[in-house]
Amino acid sequence: MSLDRNKIVVMKFGGTSVEDAAAITRTAAIVEGRLALGLRPLVVVSAMAKVTDHLLAAADAAGTGQRSGALAISARMRTRHAETAGSLLGPAQGGTIINDLHAEFDSLDDLLRGIAAVGELTPRTTDLVVSFGERLSSRIVTAALARRGVASAHLDARMCIVTTADFGKAVPLEDEIEQRLLKHVLPLLQAGNVPVMGGFIGATVDGITTTLGRGGSDFSAALAGGGLRAGAIEIWTDVDGIMTTDPRIVAEALRVKTISFEEAAELAYFGAKVLHPATILPAVQQNIPVLVLNSRNSSSEGTRITAVAPRCKSPFKCIAIKKRLTIVDIVASRMLMSHGYLKAVFDVFDRHRVAIDMVSTSEVSISVTVDTSDRLPAIAADLQRIADVKYESNKALVCMVGEDIRGHNGIAGKVFTAVQHVNVRMISQGASEINMSFMIEEEDVPEAVRSLHAAFFTDPDPAIFDLTNRSAGATLAPA
């Protein structure tokens, strides 16, 4: 049976959307709602809230020889998952899934015992341990859908999400993924089933378990949507969409109704927790709209992310904040303008696999910002062979995102007038048409953001911003 691909909707549910029986019940009802509209959902789920953290803690404990501590963490997770399944399914129908969960936990405990016996935790083994979170939650969600009469089918994500062997941050092999999706997922959709798989996890061509890194469940959903040429990708979380800024800082923050892929990618990179930057890329490639929605408030329209967004009357749509940054100053007065010097500097960061957020140069120095601190001593040691180096921590990046910022006369003056009482350390304008960024002290973030929001969002465009509820919604929270 042929299937209109535009009817396929990839629905990714985050950890808070599957954290307990009540949350999973809401999630199942949302999936039923999509079916009632004639859509064909593919469900991608994260681990239950906090489970990935617990799995990492168990792995670390086992890696340091604390066998009993690791098993104790596993036992608590076992109880939580079994109780959730029992509450959802009842004693009659819960028996099979609970037995499956116990079998998974038995495998996890054997793995933890092996790690403790060896006394060493490798990235490959870490990926295998943390993969259990999504493997468990996807089984429970599949059973919960079946309990409600939905024809659901559990699918091990490792059958479809094929990656490199870069453990902890594996790179997807998109051509292979598309082939696997067409082989394993499309037939289920054509048969009227709702496939359910875990996000975040994948496997090499040889079947070795990997993970996609931070925000990996979003990435899994986007890869699935792109490979299936889906009509839409929905990111279901516990917030109403993308907001103009963090409502914990500005209570009057507004929900953004629609935003472009390019703007959303900037926000995601510069601090927005709602989306991971990689989520955007497969969607952009296939021109698939992405919707950010709230599983606790499914009536909210959320935020729609499309290739091209409507024009906005105001220059900015959002203010994102990225904290815990470090400024690295590199000074070499006689070498800065010499051929190959900048390449030598950036090669150091490349060797240490550290991404740079912002760059500023003068005649005698280069300043860069990075979001890691554990590798800075080694980076500084390498840089000191060619320059003098110093670094300052506890900095924050404020990122103003909007349309054609360079085309608004006097915009920089208005921005820095709004924050004239705050010490600005670095400025970046002109590198992007949609982004103006600057560095400040972390402690100055609340005051700076409140001042900027008051200056630029007093007369919001109703075509772009939801004016009905100014205090509830998503957060562009600091990382």
Image: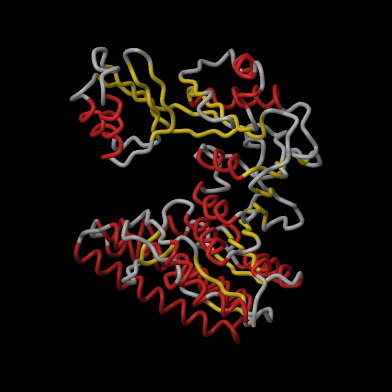
State the image coordinates of residue 274 (x, y, percent, origin top left): 58, 47
Image height of 430 relative to 83, above or below: above
Quadrant housing the N terminus: bottom right
Q: Which residue occupies 27% across, 21% down? A: 389
Image height of 434 relative to 419, above or below: below
Front position in the image: 3 or 274: 3
Q: Answer with the quarter of the image where residue 158 lies.
A: bottom left
Image height of 265 relative to 295, above or below: above
State the image coordinates of residue 139 (x, y, percent, origin top left): 52, 74
Q: Which residue occupies 72% across, 38% down? A: 254
Front position in the image: 63 or 173: 173
Front position in the image: 161 or 97: 161
Residue at the extreme bottom? 92
State the image coordinates of residue 159 (x, y, percent, origin top left): 43, 73
Image height of 121 relative to 208, above or below: above
Q: Which residue occupies 55% across, 65% down? A: 44
